[in-house]
Amino acid sequence: MKIKILLLIIVSLLLCNFIALYQIVRLRSENRLWKNKIILSIEDQQSLYEHRIEGNYLGDEIFLLAEKYKKSDIQINKNRYFLIYLFKGVSCDRCFSDEINIFKKYKETLKSYGILPVMVFTEMSERDYINIVKSADIEDISIWADTPRIFIKYNELRNSILLFVGRKGNIIMATILDYYRDKSKSDKFYNRIIELMENF
């Protein structure tokens, strides 16, 4: 009799443990599911940010660029398309070099569509800026933005960003550069611009 009671207790405890283990596994699975829904990946966060700034008006920024941009052969005004490169700091020389090479690949295509590229360098010393643009041979399309008013609205971003701006001064498309996760992101962005311009 005692053995039967003992076996019954053991079976009951095993059953309770099994039920508890099942509940833990189910709760962990539900937690992972909700975590994935609530906490977006970095790529998803970037994508949401890119879409959120589309349509933003950059008239004030373009005016400030025009004030600083004294190259006589290129005039910044509100009646043309821009591809604005907002480079931040000197933390990724290789990324910058890759981006310049991609730009040079599409340079003539941009020109054929009347798109003016303007490379704006922020959060760096003037000496670093001069060294970078000279070595990349982009002095004619580059600006050292030493004033914090230019593009202050994007200071929350640590990554560099490309802004395709329409003739009315609004952002048509934007992309955040992220070479660690998607090296082809800039190429895709250029191709979207070309496709868009072909349909205008």
Image (spheres, rainbow, N blue to C red):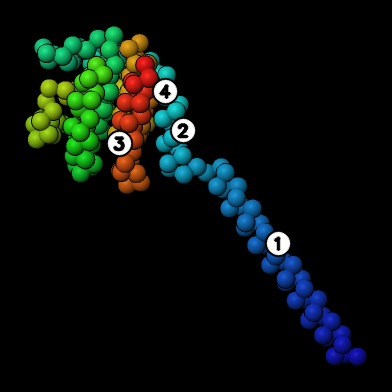
Q: Residue 54 shows which numbered tag? A: 4
Q: CA distance from mark 1 to mark 3?
A: 48 Å
Task: Give 101 or 131, whichever is nearer the viewer.
Answer: 101
Tell me the kind of residue under disc 3.
Answer: Asp
Tell me the kind of residue under disc 4.
Answer: Glu
Locate residue 61: give its quadrant: top left
Q: Single out the mark in the foreground, 1 or 4.
A: 4
Q: Single out the mark in the foreground, 1 or 2.
A: 2
Q: Residue 48 shows which numbered tag? A: 2
Give the residue at mark 3. Answer: 187
Q: Single out the mark in the foreground, 3 or 4.
A: 3
Q: Name the residue at 10% across, 30% down.
A: 137
**Location of residue 23 in the rendering, given as x and y in whole percent from the top left corner:** 70, 62
Give the residue at mark 1. Answer: 23
Is 169 on the left or on the right of 14, as rendered? left
Dot 1, how many residues are within 10 Å of its Cα: few (below 14), some (14-19), or many (20+)?
few
